[in-house]
Image (spheres, rainbow, N blue to C red):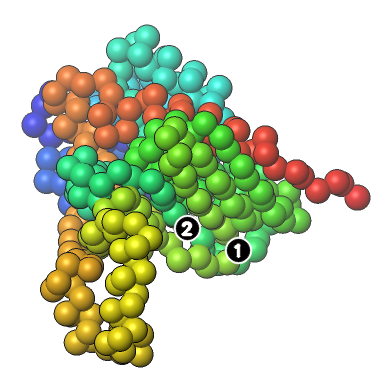
Amino acid sequence: MRDTIRWGILGTGQVAGLFARGLREIPDAQLLAVGSRSRQNADAFAREHGVPRAYATYEDLVRDANVDVVYVATPNSAHREHCLLALEHGKPVLCEKPFTLDAAEASAIAETARARGLFCMEGMWMRFVPVLRELESRVRAGAIGDVRMLTANLGLPIEFDPRHRLFDPKLGGGALLDLGVYPLSLALRLMGRPTRITSQAVFGQTGVDEQCTILLEFPEGRQAALTTSVRNRTTDDAALMGTEGMIHLHEPLYRPETLSLVRSPRLGGGREVSRMRGYAERLGLGRIKHHPLVREVRQAVGFVRTERVTRRVLGNGYAHEALEVMRCLREGLRESPLMPLDESVELMRTVDAIRREWTRPTPL
């Protein structure tokens, strides 16, 4: 693989622009070409982002022999078609999340990439930022003991527009596919495959899910509770809870930079808890427990110990997924260990199972 890796982008929408800006953070990455469904859109994108080559069709871009890897940034409903188009022309692929609309489409892409011996990866923005590597490292090291629970929420109040892709069922709109895959991907990465799924959704006037709640059960009694919405704001963060502490992943969940690690000792049982409560009552701690000095003392004697860790992202954060692609290409890897194809397929299987739980409103 050459020193500079040359990128082509399929699509000219908002996400394509974010990725183009992200590539500027990488000295040995070049955005060589952009492809669109129209000459006007391709030329406008090329002017805005300084792209040397603009193509009026997606086919022309994937035929460019000088393009080393293709980033698919078209609407959700077109991901399968455009990933396969690039792979069939011998191009490695980075596909914007969600990977596809369902598990069958995801499996088709994975099978094609493997059959052709080509690199392919889902671009799940959150999964490649440095603080996620820190979180996984701390969990593997047992920083919070046995992981038992996860809560994660991502909701943004997006103005309703029936013409917008988020509210268009034909384009793969809805809260789950656009935002919910972030907390869901985090849950599967940290806890594995769920054994039971429960979910409810609220549907808007265009028929897409505008908000939903998800409860996941995993082996050995582990649980995850997730929420997502495109009509109202949620806390936009996550908390991973274990037997010896918890990790709070601060907002924004889709591109986090900071986590707080809270360690607490495991209590010996009911008698110890009662004894500690008795001490607190005699000392009058119930009235002053929130005083800053009391909190400092509690931490000093081991009741709670908090560590805050920040790992800044490059630019807008998209550079990290591009860096992972480039690392894998140079090392001859056909899949990324950070986001292997099996995880993308399993994510879509879980999405399918979640949607089967929903009761859709009866048409008038």
> Percent x, y for residue 173?
60, 46
The relative height of residue 108 versus residue 78 in the rendered view (above or below) is above
Q: Residue at x 16, y 46 (%)?
A: 26
Secondary structure of the residue carrying tag 1 is loop
Q: Residue at x 62, y 45 (%)?
A: 199
- Dot 2 or dot 1: first in sequence order is 2
Mark 1, residue position: 231
Which numbered mark, 2 or 1, is in the foreground of this view? 2
Residue type beneath disc 1:
Arg
The residue closer to the viewer here, 19 or 317, is 317
Quarter assignment of residue 282: bottom left
Instruction: Check the image and name the residue furthest to the left.
Output: 3
Q: Residue at x 37, y 17 (%)?
A: 113
Pick the residue in front: 137 or 69: 137
| Residue occupying the point 48% across, 20% down | 107
Q: Which residue is mark 2?
A: 154
Label 2 element class: strand
